[in-house]
Amino acid sequence: MAVSTSSATPVIATDDVFLAGCPSRTVLEHVTSKWGLLLLIALSEGEQRWSTLRRRADGISEKMLAQTLKTLERDGLVSRQAQAIIPPRVDYSLTDRGHELSALLVPLAAWAIQNAQDIIAGQNSTAT
Amino acid sequence: MAVSTSSATPVIATDDVFLAGCPSRTVLEHVTSKWGLLLLIALSEGEQRWSTLRRRADGISEKMLAQTLKTLERDGLVSRQAQAIIPPRVDYSLTDRGHELSALLVPLAAWAIQNAQDIIAGQNSTAT
DNA sequence: CGGTATCCTAGGAGATACTG
DNA sequence: CAGTATCTCCTAGGATACCG
């Protein structure tokens, strides 16, 4: 009943990635998800069609492609342009916010590419 | 038999995040995993003990903490210093490579914090 | 072509209990 | 304190089939 503002449960908190259930964690998980990351990076190279993305993100299933694109669209990171023609044509591109984000993601991917060999190589140090 | 170097199967490929099964994807997934990301960012603030990390990464289970730290250590991103005392004390810190990486991750977290409110707010645009 | 709907399983992830 | 071991649950994610 008392105004226990200090020891109150951290309902949502202003913003701290470290707090469970905070929005930033959710967002972070969307954009750093396996396919989210890849699609954002792919789209950083420009607008692309569904089928192109599917080929680009090697190994992705149609389900995950649709699902991930929807999440990213919902998050306002990706924009979807459908044309009512036969056969259908749908293009996906980054929004401004998406571009802002991908600018952060691309260096990350570059880092991974540069360090991957080295990192994985050291995994089995039990070489003959 | 012929030197089909051009159309050869992409066994592992030099490095392309887009190719399934390539090392960079694996590394990227370690590093952008829910807890991996959080721990790397937490450690970017300096060496920390197990118990500190556990409290910091709100919601993490002991299992996931141990597992994630091991992966990061194996990847050469985190270093573990154990002291043979009672009670035990173990400190974790970033390696040089880990620091290099966290420099990329921190801005990402910052971006998430800044944009999260806005992004999540727009989720239920079907307001009454 | 660009999806959606359905089914199904591998393993990511939490809870608990125990140990050095 | 800093883990490990085990058990279970849940859902992310793949395969397939079908629709506009």
Image (cartoon, coloured by chain):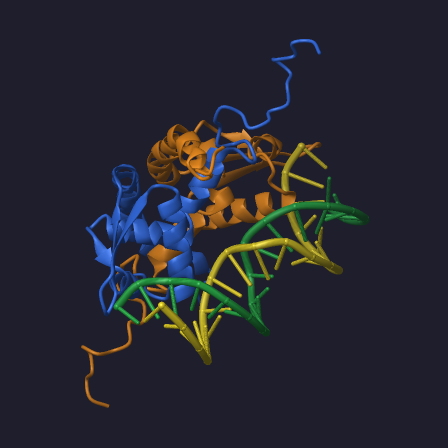
Chain colours: A orange, B blue, C yellow, D green
User: How many numbered marks does the figure carry?
Assistant: 0
Q: Residue at x 58, y 34 (%)?
A: A58
Quadrant assignment, res B116 = bottom left
Pick the front one: D5 or B126? D5
Pick the front one: B85 or D2? B85
Q: In this view, does B34 lie above or below A61?
A: below
Q: Which residue is drawn at 48% across and 32% down?
A: B17
Quadrant assignment, res B27 = top left
**Residue A75 seen in render:** no
Residue C6 placement (x, y as % from top left) = 74, 59
Q: In this view, does B98 lie to the left or right of A115?
A: left
Pick the front one: B93 or A34? B93
Q: Which residue is drawn at 59% across and 30% down?
A: A52
Residue B96 placement (x, y as % from top left) = 25, 38
Quadrant assignment, res A114 = top left
Q: Is residue B92 left or right of residue D3?
A: left
Residue A6 placement (x, y as % from top left) = 18, 77
Q: Residue at x 31, y 61 (%)?
A: B57
Pick the front one: B82 or A71? B82
Q: Where the C terminus of chain B falls, by quadrant?
A: bottom left
Q: In this view, does B77 lie to the left or right of A51?
A: left
Q: Residue furthest top?
A: B2
**Residue A47 seen in render:** yes
Q: Where the N terminus of chain B falls, by quadrant?
A: top right
